[in-house]
Image (spheres, grey):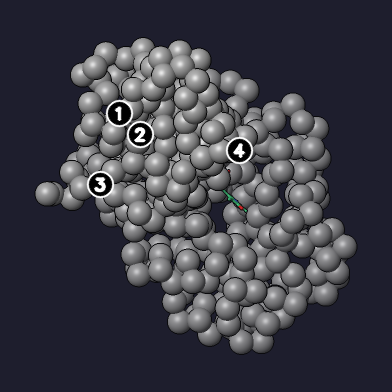
Amino acid sequence: MPAADRATAVLTVDLAAIVENYRILQRRFAGREVTVSLKADAYGVGAAAVGPALWRAGARRFFVATLDEGIVLRGLLPSASIAVLHGLTTGPVAEFLRHDLLPVHNSIAEIDAWLAEAPGRAAGLHLDTGMARLGMPPDEVAALAASGRLRGLPLAFVMSHLGCADEPDNPLNAQQRDRFVDACRALDVSAQVPRSLVASSGLFLDDSYHFDIARPGAALYGISPTPSRPNPMRPAIRLTGKILQLRYVDTDSTVGYGATHRMTRTGRVATIGAGYADGVLRALGNRGHAIVDGRRVPMVGRISMDLLTIDVTELPDDAVQPGRSVDLIGPGNDIDTVAASAGTIGYELLTRLGPRLERHYLAADASAAGNAA
Ligand SMILES: *Cc1c(COP(=O)(O)O)cnc(C)c1O
């Protein structure tokens, strides 16, 4: 059997849609630079496919979390600028130099380690403006400003990260923006150094947040950057599972582990060859839906490791024959909807897609590739 017929669960990644999403963000950010966040293997979608597709679409600067992610990406994109968000905590200076990776410095200690071994070499700087997560907090920014160290450090960019950008009315956004401006001023950051505050959601805040560089990830894959408004992005991810068996079940029978679903009528249950090992989160048991023949049908019973069950009583026979595929993520059941059913966010859903999935990449079209440098 060809591989496509063997697979019981298939992830389809539409690279043309990802490139189109990049263009949508570029239009939104007209005149400035849209870089790409490719951490966690491009949010589980596959950096080996997404990175080169976006490079051909014109992206030149990429962000990853760790040195090792950077080394992998360097192998795929020999000429790109690649910045490592977790910086020197993820590996030695020599490795950053060997692979031409830019560390993002999150502390004075990291700056000192860099200055000692890589004098004159550029790096990024992350300022914590209120997330209390990564970057230099205000007291350390003040110490850095007073120390004069930045005179010896060419800055590739200065960045901060918004904690509530998906809530446009949250007052923390303006507070973080103002603190970012203040911190850049305290550090006497030159106007030539690009500044970066926004990722996917921040791109949809007003201009005062935009500065010079955006670092979106999620929106490229179709996750909504504007949860309180219609999603401006194109869907790019589809997850399908094959019907393995069909069961006729009587009133009062139960379905699956723990007997958590009891049939209240005589009906039909289809067993799909996808489970939590494939990234169909267990939290979707008795809560999620599949789309079969354009109709939304409920997942019944718990999600197993390799299987899940849906109630297809209402569907015509030919729609539910073993061998047919149903949509688990796709039109009518987008990433955000599925994530919400599981009590999580699209980001987590994507990064949990399992290694067993058969992955199909739909090529970005020739016109997208036409911009290749
Ligand atoms: C993950 C991350 C991004 C990308 O965020 P999205 O919401 O996926 O666009 C940008 N910057 C930093 C610091 C991040 O951690």
Give the Cα distance between marks 3 and 1: 18 Å
Give the left or right position of residue 267, taking residue 63 as reference: left
User: In the drawing, what numbered circle is on residue 271?
Assistant: 2
Identify which residue is drawn at 29% across, 19% down.
293
Tag 1 and tag 2, C-beta contact below 8 Å: yes
- Element marked by disc 1: strand
Write down the residue under mark 3.
7
Give the label, 2 or 4, closer to the camera: 2
Identify which residue is drawn at 45% across, 13% down.
265
- Element marked by disc 2: strand
Q: Where is residue 188 in the image (x, y as percent from the top left)?
A: 76, 60
Q: How crowded is mark 4: few (under 14 residues within 10 Å), some or many (20 or more)?
A: some
| Residue 153 higher or lower than 127, as above or below | below
Q: Does mark 4's beta carbon lie closer than 8 Å to ligand 1?
A: no
Write down the residue under mark 1.
246
Whichever of labels 3 and 4 marks the residue nearer the N terminus, that label is 3
Q: Is residue 14 visible?
A: no
| Residue 320 higher or lower than 130, as above or below | above
Which corner quadrant holds the C terminus? bottom left
